[in-house]
Amino acid sequence: MLFSCSKRQTSFGEFVNAVQIPNARLRKLFRCGARIVTGWVVLSVLAFISYRLHFSVAAVASVFLVAVMIESLSGDFSASAAVSLIAFAYLDYFFTDPKLSFVVADPSDFLDLIAFLLAALVITRLVSRLRLQERAAQVERRRTERLFRLAQELLTLEPKTAIDSTCLEPFCRVFEMRAVSLFDQETSELHSAGESHASLGDRTRDAYLTQKDSDDHLTRVSTRCLRIAGKTQGAIGFEDLDECNLMAGPLAAIAATVLERTQAFRSASQAVATAQSEAYRSAILDALAHEFKTPLATILAAAGGLQEAGPLKPAQMEMTETVETEAAHLGQLTSRLLRMARLDRDEVRPQMEWIDIVSLAEQVVERYSKLRTGRGISLLKGCRSAETIIDPELVRLAISQLLDNACKYSDLGSTVTVTIDDQDDVIAIRVSNTGSSISLVERHRVFDRYYRGTEARNLASGSGLGLYVARKIALAHGGRLELEDPTAADGTTFRLIIPVSKSEAHHYDLSTAAN
Amino acid sequence: MTSVQQRTSILVVDDETSLRQALRGSLAASGFAVEEARTGEEAVEFAREHSFDLVLLDINMRGISGVEACRRIRGFAPQTGIVMVTVRDSEDDKVRALEAGADDYITKPFLLRELVARLRAVLRRTHSDNGASGSILRAGNLELDVERHILRREGQEIHLSPKEFELLAFLMKNRDVPLTHIKLLRAIWGAEYGNELEYLRSYIRMLRKKIENDPAKPDYILTEPWVGYRFHNPSDPDSPKPQSDESG
């Protein structure tokens, strides 16, 4: 493998780079050896020249010291120490008396030698440490620069609803990696950039599944889990990333922010899309209901005209009456649909009026019983009357809606029970049916707009707006609409709670006083 | 043209051809002399040239709106009865139409007999100047002596506060006329009133308690949702019944 990514671009580095060495430690050893050999060659040349020119020990020691200092600039203390020892040996062998022997006769020479060795070691130690520090600072600066550049490139990208290669390419380019893969848990999709030689994608997905970070030095693959707000939301894998133990963490942090941004954008666009489709649906309901009104008015006018134009035979009269009745019924249905669409879309503006809610409920039940629903409707009154300030039209609509719902989801021939109770400061209207209960999963969704029970979708007709609008009406009156907890018996009970206003006298006093 | 002079003349204004034609046939069968107009502009022009007893005016039309056409026709034909055709959810339009001088409105879709009843009621009012100019107003089992400030129900005198009396008298004088909240407030409390719906509601409630058999199911003082109130005489066969309720 070529280590083209090396940042130590000294002359030795270049030489060493030309040779293929697989292991980093071996590479380091080789580089150190090469430095020692070079130092040895330089010293040998210097020793030879000095020996021929008969330099004194002190002069040669100075020359050697300079050479050792230059050597120590490489920042490799062990190589410099070895070169210092070689210089020490050369001084001893060639320049102290007796010459060409390691024996030192003159004690002052001995002192010179010791002084040289100490000075050489201290200097090389200091210089190489400085050099190392400087290099570390350089590496650190470069690393920061790259991270900054990457962050900047990613920030300038347009927000997208999904991670794609344009989000990952900057990682590859800035950090000179072979390949990058990202697994997005939310979409369960794997995204990649670059060309992997070590099945990076699979390993990234595995990293998410096992929730473990890893660094494989042999294939140079690193994987990191991406955590957003303490939860693992995906994983990223790098192939051929230098200093992976140092860099994988910060890169994963950047990738996590990219993922978070994408997910946020995705949910925001989904919310917009949902809102749009709901508005569209509402608009269609509205338009449909409106478009129906004129043809219905025409049918009714024509049917009425036929009766007036008469004389009709009894059978003809009956038929025109059927046309009239059914068209009028269709008119009521479209009016209600239109009303619902309007209530669904706009804020509910109750038109409050003092009214006895018990007799209002009674009227609704009475009228509903006349419709041919095929179910019995029984009314149980817990109180005789309860006056309060409500919008009678809206409350009537809400109760009708509950009755409608109870009939729709009960067996033919069963009984729907309506009970009215006065509880302290609220009126509770409960509408129960038998034969159908709402599953636990569906309980919390029944009030959702356009939600229809899984069974209902096949069995009963409806717009999915009824309960949603009924609840909206309850809320507009300061009340609520609830689904009661299931009892042992099969069936469903909805409870409409409307607060009772106690201030009727107060209202009247106020207005009387104002006269 | 001879029949036009004998029968009640009505101008039907609607931009929907089929509805216009159905209404023409049916109203003709019900004894009206019918003319048609397709737009508000045409209606104003027509009404200026011929004098109609009644104008049935759709509120939603291309060109000038029904409300604007109503205002213009009312400008030169104070004796013509104007009935607006509206849709259920355009309460603001209804209020605007009444303020622009319409005598009544009917909500689409409607039964022919409901429409005819309303047209006849409007006609009766416009021709007899409300038919309520006398000092004693009667409706059902109620008898209101305007001058002596006395209300009798089935012969029994019922005590009313001065404001309650004024309100009931105003409603009875304008029977079968939809009266907007603002109109009622200004007529009874004064021109500076208009938003004090609470007062009105409280008074209507007290009146209903005093005159209705079942205040929750009123026979006399009917609520026109989002618009106002209308006094109805349950024992008058010519008095149009309220339009069938659509929410049940």
Image (tube, rainbow, N blue to C red):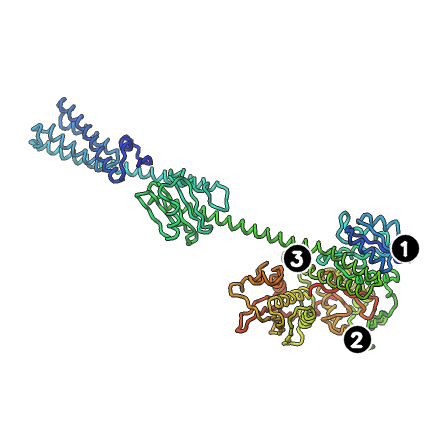
Q: With A109 as the anchor, is B211 left or right in this view?
A: right
Asked if badge 1 and badge 2 are on a common chain, one would say: yes
Q: How far apart are marks 1 and 2 (CA)?
A: 48 Å
Residue A37 image position (x, y, % from top left): 20, 31
Give the farthest residue toward the top. Answer: A53
Residue found farthest to the bottom: B156
Q: Answer above or below: position of B198 versus A164.
A: below
Is residue B141 rendered to the left or right of residue A452?
A: right
Q: Nearer the viewer, residue A321 or A444?
A: A321
In what element is the residue under mark 3? helix
Please check whether the numbered discs 1 and 3 fall on a single chain: no
**Residue at numbered disc 3:** A342
Q: In this view, does A422 lie above or below A155?
A: below
Separation of residues labelled 3 and 2 (CA atoms): 43 Å
Q: How far apart are marks 1 and 3 (CA)?
A: 43 Å
The residue that disc 2 covers is B158
> Residue B4 got which mark?
1
Give the quarter of the figure containing the N terminus of chain A: top left
Label 2's element?
Answer: strand
In the rendered view, tell whether residue A52 sits above or below residue A249: above
Residue at screen point 15% across, 28% down: A58
As shown in the figure, which amino acid type bears the numbered disc 3?
Arg
Instruction: Out of B44 and A71, give the one closest to the viewer.
Output: B44
Where residue B13 appears, as percent x and y from the top left, is 80, 52
Q: Which amino acid does label 1 sit on?
A: Val
Q: In which quarter of the image is residue A107?
A: top left
